[in-house]
Amino acid sequence: VGVVADESAAPPPRANERPKRKRVPTQKHKPPPPSPLTPPVVVVVGAGLAGVGCAKTLVEHGAAVVVVEARQRVGGRCCTADLGGGVTVDMGASWIHGVRKNPLYAEACGLGLHCVDTGADVALRDGETGEDLARSPDDAAAFAAFNAALGAARKAGEAVAEAAAEAEAPAGVSSKAAPRHGVDQSLGPGVEKALKDAAAPKSWRRFLQWHEANLEYANATSLSNLSCRFWDQDDGSAYEGAHCAIREGLQRLCWGLAAGLDVRPGWAAASVEARTPGPGERRCVVT
């Protein structure tokens, strides 16, 4: 019986010929999903308004935060005395300056605190007679003289700084491109010299002292600790709008911002040290 070969069938493999393998599509290797990042641990030194505000923002962004405070209270320079009967007095910081787009004002309103517009007028009265001195001719003249003294002190400081920069600038380099000079020049002696040169009358003395004290209060330090050239460099960033005080006291705002934070009073920070335990590791140790 004859056998008819199927011409469409594949020919048998020859001797020593390996059969071809069929290609099976393979799936691409997918890396395992990344493990969730460990939140950074941050130590904030100081439970004043800046410290608790910083800690609150860090917590909102997922960080684990500990706030250490040397005092036994929260508030820093915000310290409110309760005199009883709903009467409070701020012994330190007292105002929220500028309410437009000011986050502190928004936080105070959110906490239900009562913000009181104190107006722009300042009550300046004679300590013995109670006479209103805020609009007296002497006060207006002393105020103009004090502002002129501030300007003269800055101008003198800039002249000294420019001379120092020109002396230290390398050849061919403009003194304006040199590092800032005059940072350590004190505002206090400059203002004192300018007022002495202006020969201010004795009747202005108490007004000038008030304006000096008011400027020191606004900057929370004496004029001798302020830079002659840069003491007002943040004026351009000031908030606009009315100035207000908080009826319950500014320290209550600090307490509200600190609610829910890990604040540890009585922990005085002695040192802050950067360490590198191993390759690629960086730590900051607070003791």
Image (spheres, rainbow, N blue to C red):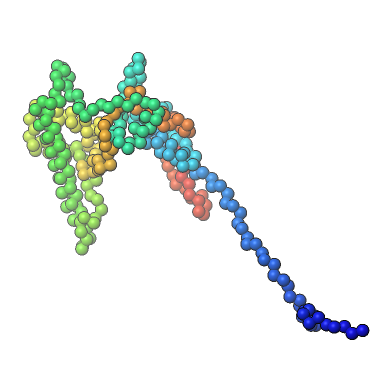
Residue 27 shown left or right of residue 212 in the figure: right
In the image, residue 279 above or below residue 256: below
Looking at the image, the residue that sits furthest to the right is 1
Residue 284 shown left or right of residue 239 in the figure: right
In the image, residue 150 above or below residue 254: below
Residue 34 shown left or right of residue 43 in the figure: right
Asked whether residue 286 is in view, the answer is: no
At x 13%, y 42%, the residue is 152
At x 35%, y 23%, the residue is 248
Looking at the image, the residue that sits furthest to the top is 85
In the image, residue 129 above or below residue 258: above
Q: Quadrant of the N terminus?
A: bottom right
Nearer to us in this view, 12 or 152: 12
Residue 35 at x, y percent in the picture: 58, 49
At x 48%, y 47%, the residue is 283
Asked whether residue 99 is in view, the answer is: yes
At x 22%, y 36%, the residue is 223
Residue 135 at x, y percent in the picture: 12, 26
- Which image quadrant for residue 110? top left
Nearer to us in this view, 97 or 262: 97
Residue 177 at x, y percent in the picture: 23, 56
